[in-house]
Image (spheres, rainbow, N blue to C red):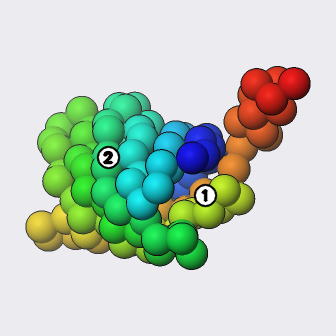
Amino acid sequence: MWFQKYNVALQTPIGTRQGHMTVSVQEHQICGTLDVLKQANPFSGTISETGECSICGELTSLFRSIPYQGTGNVTQEALCLLLRGKKESFVLSGRAGASALAEEREGTA
C-alpha cells in the first residue's frame, strides 16, 4: 500500500488549470481525490504493478459536471492520464509534491 500527493496540471480548452491529486493504492485498487477547477472530486479504479491504471470520476466546475473515464500511468513519482468525457478529453499530468514526501518521512520517523 502507498499514498502520494501530486501537483497536477489539467489541460482544458481554455488553458491549463493547476491543482492537486491525492492517490492511495492498495493491491490493485486505486482511489483518491482530484482537486482542480476549485472543486475536489473522488475517483476510483484499478492499477497494475507497473502503474498502468484505469479510473473513473467526475470533473466539476462552477458551471457543469463532466463524468470521465481515465487511462494512463501512475507511479509514486509522477502521473500522466487521459481523462475522456462524453464530448471532450483532458490531459492530466503531475509530479509528486515536496510536501507529500515530507509528510511521508514524518510518518515513518
Residue 18 can be seen, yes or no: no
- What's under tag 2, amino acid-wise? Phe
Residue under the image location 39 percent in, 46 percent down: 31
Is 52 situated above or below 56?
Answer: below
Secondary structure under badge 1? strand
Instruction: Report the residue that reaches farthest toward the front.
Output: 27
In the rendered view of the protein, which quadrant contains the C terminus? top right
Cβ–Cβ under 8 Å for marks 1 and 2: no
Residue 94 badge: 1
Residue 58 badge: none
Front residue of this view, candidates 104 and 7 = 104
Q: Is 64 left, or right, of 6 in this rendering? A: left
Q: Nearer the viewer, mark 1 or mark 2?
A: 2
Q: Is 57 left, or right, of 9 in this rendering? A: left
In the rendered image, residue 101, in percent from the top left (x then y), is placed at: 78, 39
In the rendered image, residue 64, in percent from the top left (x then y), is placed at: 15, 42
Instruction: Report the residue that reaches farthest toward the right.
Output: 109
Residue under the image location 41 percent in, 52 percent down: 30
Q: Count how many numbered circles sit on residues in the image.
A: 2
Front residue of this view, candidates 109 and 39 = 109
Secondary structure under badge 2? strand
Residue under the image location 66 percent in, 56 percent down: 76
Q: Is 68 left, or right, of 70 in this rendering? A: left
In the rendered image, residue 46, in percent from the top left (x then y), is placed at: 35, 62
Residue 96 can be seen, yes or no: yes
Q: Is 1 left, or right, of 102 in this rendering? A: left
How crowded pointer 1 is (Cα within 10 Å; few <14, some 14-19, many 20+) is rated as many
How crowded pointer 2 is (Cα within 10 Å; few <14, some 14-19, many 20+) is rated as many
Indicate the quadrant where residue 68 lies. bottom left
- What's under tag 1, amino acid-wise? Gly
Residue 43 badge: 2
Is 108 situated above or below 95?
Answer: above
